Amino acid sequence: MTTTAPRLGNALARLLILAAALLGTLLAGAAPASAHAALTGSDPKDGAVVATAPKEVNLTFSEQVAMSPDSIRVLDPAGRRADTGEMRDLCSGSVVRYGVELRAGLPDGTYTVAWQTVSADSHPIAGAFTFSIGAPSSTSVALPDQTPGGGLVGTLYGIARYLSYAGFAVLVGGGAFVLACWPRGASVRPVQQTVVRGWLTLTVATLAMLLLRNPYTGSGELSDAFDLAGLKTVLETKTGAALTSRLLLLGAAALFVAVLFGAYARRTDPKEKKDLAFGLGLGGTVVAAGIAGTWALAEHASTGLQPGVAMPVDILHLLAVAAWLGGLTVLLVALYRAPSVERSAVERFSKVAFGSVAVLAATGLYQSWRQVGSWSALTGTRYGQLLLVKIGLMAVLIGIAWVSRRWTRRLADPATREADADAGSDEADEVAEETDESAGREPEVSEAEAAEPTEPTEPTEAIDPQRAAQLARQRAAVATARRKRERDADPERAGLRRSVLTEAAVAVVLLAVTTVLTSTEPGRTEEEAGRATSASGPAAVPDRPVDIRLPFDTGGVDGKGVVRLSLDPGRTGANALHIFVERPNGKPLDVPEIKVALTLEAKDVGPLPVAPDRIQTGHWSASGVQIPMPGDWKIQVTVRTSEIDQTTIDKNVKIG
């Protein structure tokens, strides 16, 4: 019989069109909200020059953060601590502000403020800026290049996050597949091993995340994973409590697995088995929702817009992912390791998977609206781009799942498959004969005889090693032929195996993208931060510096970057000019020369040249820059990155 791959139906196309329409509607009407915390202000400001030493340094954040006594450090030009280490909580209402007191009698010069904390969605954030007392000076402070949550510890933590998601999906989805779709699978050893391995993976990954949490949010040194004091601090945080709760719930999950593959698998009375299945289903759902809640309570869903709605939605999303992808994994194992899985079981899973996709579509659209917020953030931020990749993978996965669903409908009935298997029994005999002939003897041992272990006819008679080897080869050939006959008896089953395998491969990539997405700054937050420092020519106001951001490309080696220019206070009279040159990745870039010129074309004033002094790597400054009159001034910046490579960039700003 010739079997052709089924075509995608119109229903799938309608489903994808509906999902796109809903996504457009949600994104078009999105409202702003907060997620990853961001530094929104400081006192003194970045690059400010103050006449006398302030009593303290204050930082303002976009949302609540977890501060420790060492979260804010102020360093003098020699790199010594200039603060007292006494953290002050200055939060009031919706304003999130923290400060640290400075020591008395600080000398003039440039001071560096370095801060590192953990946002309410569990991700570490850090930054640094400078201010000067009296006048700018050189500084010996060297800040670490490693971003918070990066390095080896960040990589290991990311791997543990991925494995925890994968283990959760296999544990929950595998248990649901057995209870809801294939009760007989509770006694199939490959299925048991798969679900147990899911539990082990989730448990080990959770323990690893608990140990790595201290260096992940702190020093970044792997050795700090075994610091008991640091571990105690982690346990007192929201994330530490969530990981600990997950471990406790995994103990209950172990009991569920033991009963499922023990008492439930051994039950023969239909009524008793049905009652036990109901109890396992109810208890398993509670435990699975509790484990999913440990993510919702500690990450993106717990902060920002509508957390009371976002957390239940996040739990539903995780459970739907587990039911689909975890069940898919166990189905794949069953198709390859237990080919006798019934057609009815595959059909039931197909319905479960369809329901899971519907839940994923609804919850995913809500999460996308909440974390992205606009079409520009969807296409112009890293989070939005990763989300588009995830949506694309989901579309591919749905398409493959639709093919699998069509293969399921073509599966042969068990009776038909057994008849086909009997009709192909001659193939096994031929394989056995070929094996014997290749071994140099007549094929006189039957399949039944080959399957039985050989015993010596007399206690004292030794087994001929050559004959024993021949029998072993024959038994292996017969077993291989039998397995091949069972798998090839139903061509549709072979097609289903291939489509499910492809579906599982795409799911592995999808899970990796999702893991990266959960640790990426949401697109809405990134876009709002970009607007705050964009080169859109902001109107200057008293006590607020003019800040512009100018990308450049000199065309040479290491010639791309960004110039951040601050003119403080941004009004007529004397101003302090600060220029920061950064690489595309945000790290400071040292260039041989940088020049600035100011021109008021409407009044034919200028260009007025400014020669800033180099303060440190990537930082230039000039004091007493005179703005003679208000108006729309053109600020021209010339950047030279080598002896021959330079470029001039400009921006108009309004100075009042």
Image (cartoon, grey):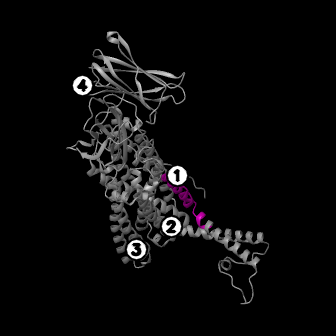
Q: Quadrant of residue 110?
A: top left
Dot 1: few (<14), some (14–19), or many (≥20) neighbours within 10 Å? some
Circle 3 or circle 2, nearest the eye: 3
Asked which secondary structure carries label 4, the reply is loop
Horizontal side of 165 relative to 29 (left or right) equals right
Q: Earlier in the sequence, mark 1 or mark 4?
A: 1
Question: In front: 96, or 121?
Answer: 96
Q: Main secondary structure of the magenta part?
A: helix
Rendering coords of residue 294 (x, y %): 34, 58
Q: Is residue 507 magenta?
A: yes
Q: Earlier in the sequence, mark 4 or mark 2?
A: 2
Quickly name the residue at label 4: 542
Quadrant where the N terminus sits is bottom right
Tell me the amino acid under the disc marked 2.
Val
Dot 2: few (<14), some (14–19), or many (≥20) neighbours within 10 Å? some
Q: Quadrant of residue 543?
A: top left
Question: In front: 461, or 120?
Answer: 120
Q: Earlier in the sequence, mark 3 or mark 2?
A: 3
Rendering coords of residue 551 (x, y %): 43, 27
Q: Earlier in the sequence, mark 3 or mark 1?
A: 1
Please say if 324 is above or below 50.
Answer: below
Tell me the amino acid under the disc marked 4.
Pro
Dot 4: few (<14), some (14–19), or many (≥20) neighbours within 10 Å? few
Are dots 4 and 2 in contact, CB under 8 Å? no
Q: Which mark is residue 6?
A: 1
Asked which secondary structure carries label 2, the reply is loop
Circle 3 or circle 1, nearest the eye: 3
Look at the image and give the residue range highlighted in magenta.
Answer: 485-508
Quadrant where the C terminus sits is top left
Quickly name the residue at label 3: 259
Asked which secondary structure carries label 3, the reply is helix
